[in-house]
Image: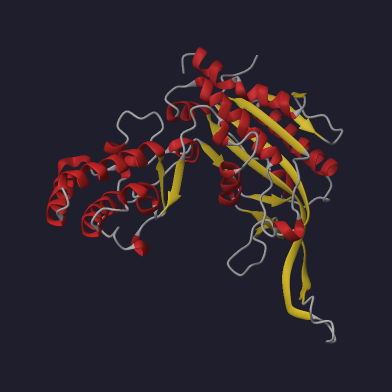
Amino acid sequence: MMTDPRFLQIHFLAPYTAALLNRDDSGLAKRLPYGDTLRTRVSSQCLKRHWRLADDPHGLHTIAGADAAYRSREVIDRKVFGAWSADIDPEVIKAVREALLKAVYGDKGVDKKSRQTLLLGQVEVDYLTETAKHLVAEAAGDAKAAKAAAEAWAKAGKANLKAMSEGAALPGGLTGALFGRMVTSDPKANIDAPVHVAHAFTVHAEEAESDYFIAADDLARDEDTGADTIQETELTSGLFYGYVVVDLPGLLANLGGDARLAGDVLHNLLYLIAEVSPGAKLGSTAPYSRAAFLMVEAGDRQPRSLAEAFRMPCAANTGVAVGKLVEHLGALDAAYATGEARRVMSLANADVPGAERGTLADLAAFVRGLPAQLVGQGA
């Protein structure tokens, strides 16, 4: 019998060839030392960004009720003050703008370099826009009156994100509800992330080479080489293990208890994990791949990664990697007997202990039903 679905765990293996998926500050592939071997790595930040911004039939933005959110230091200028403010006295706009910047980004918010790159939900952007319009109207073209009105608004206790999103189901938008939000200037506006994402890494030692290339000058045919630019980049290949955990009660709480919305989120998120590729250099490497293996687990015990299966590097082969994962999973099952319900999609012919095999659609349907089951159990 299936245990209460408190946690959803998602494991995947994804292959990439001659790609540069995630770069460090020097332009090289990110790496991770593990098991005395250097691996190629894709950061959790990179993975989450591609999943949340994916322009895809299963994109998070396609879900009914998925409020937008914007992660930026320039939300006030780019989203709050739009065309409506173009014909208003610049001094009036300046007074109101500075008050809003301090309210959102802290006392030093007027200076762009001092602002936190902050996630704001659409409901908060709408509140700020209406507030700006109200303060401008109240000033009636007088810059001093605008400043006084803005200061009075700030002192009234409405200049914080909690007040801005009062009663909203998704104060930080769907992005905040999934991946959380930290606001250093307003801790009460923090949102705990129910979706936890590990850095993906190759199950084998890094496979990398330096790629020397030129940009040819099409019109310089009378010269020896026609090479206008000579450059060098790094290319890597690998089979990556990735791991995601969803705290289901936490997700439901962040979504206002909406089991339908939570189910749709899990359904689409699973598709994105399996089908959306992170990657730089799209035009020159076409790093498009899909998961060769995907396993989902639902249970009530603390989650655990299966990364230990690959501490000793294995061959860059899906069948071999799945075999190592199955071996480690079997040992964990024997020791802990946690009783998770499992579903597996695999391009390799290997049985997984206690897992029902199916297509990606089958797995997505399974995870979609978990929030409703949890609500039905009175969580």
97 is higher (above) or lower (below) than 209: above
Q: Is residue 110 left or right of residue 336?
A: left
Name the residue at the front extreme. Answer: 87
377 is higher (above) or lower (below) than 335: above
171 is higher (above) or lower (below) than 143: above
* x 18%, y 49%: residue: 150
Q: Position of residue 334 (x, y in %)?
A: 71, 29
* x 26%, y 37%: residue: 163
Q: Is residue 205 visible?
A: no
Foreground residue among 357 and 273: 273
Residue 69: quarter of image: top left
Q: Is residue 199 left or right of residue 255?
A: right
Residue 51: quarter of image: top right
Q: Is residue 141 visible?
A: yes
Q: Is residue 190 left or right of residue 25?
A: left
Image quarter of the N terminus: top right
Name the residue at the bottom extreme. Answer: 223
Foreground residue among 371 and 114: 114
Q: Position of residue 259 (x, y in %)?
A: 51, 20
* x 25%, y 42%: residue: 131
Q: Position of residue 321 (x, y in %)?
A: 80, 43
Q: Position of residue 261 (x, y in %)?
A: 52, 24
Q: Which coloring applies here?
A: secondary structure
